[in-house]
Amino acid sequence: MQNYKTEGQRDTKNYSPSSNRRPTFSPRKKRVCYFCSKGIEPDYKNVVQLKNYISDKGKILPSKVTKTCAKHQRRVAKAIKRSRMISLLSFVDKYRE
Ligand SMILES: [Zn+2]
């Protein structure tokens, strides 16, 4: 019988989570997009809604953080940029006056 495992490869079955990599069997939580679940679209006039998608520094948060789907992430980004242009949202830090 041929041994397929070379020395450099790791055995995934006896994988210990002590290293900094994620364990292979992590229970995945289902991603629920806020806009998909509510059936609404991001609105550049709705500042209260868009504030959930920007960081303290005024940056647009990645979809990984906000759990937004790709389609709505694009629309959120566009809405935030649009609302910055009409100065509803700030370009920089919201705590800086
Ligand atoms: Zn969505």
Image (cartoon, helix red, strand yellow):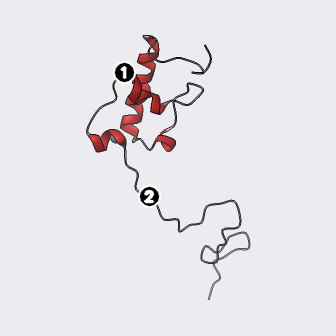
Q: Which mark is residue 44?
A: 1
Q: Residue furthest bottom?
A: 1
Q: Is residue 7 above or below residue 96?
A: below
Q: Which mark is residue 3?
A: none
User: Crowding at label 1, few (<14), some or many (≥20) Cα neighbours within 10 Å?
Assistant: many
Q: Earlier in the sequence, mark 1 or mark 2?
A: 2
* Callout 2 crowding tier (Cα within 10 Å): few <14, some 14–19, many ≥20: few
Residue drawn at point x = 56 percent, y = 24 percent: 58
**Which residue is pictured at 70% across the width and 67% down the height?**
18
Q: Nearer the viewer, residue 94 or 59?
A: 94
66 up-or-down from 57: above or below = below
Q: Quadrant of the N terminus?
A: bottom right
Name the amino acid type tagged 2. Answer: Lys
- Residue bearing the label numbered 2: 29
Q: Hey, which quadrant is residue 77 in on the image?
A: top left
**Image x and y of residue 71, in percent:** 36, 37
Q: Is mark 2 within 8 Å of ligand 1?
A: no
Answer above or below: position of 17 versus 77.
below
Within the displayed image, which quadrant is ligand 1 positioned in? Answer: top left
Q: Residue at x 37, y 44 (%)?
A: 33
Quarter where residue 34 is shown: top left
Disc 2 element: loop
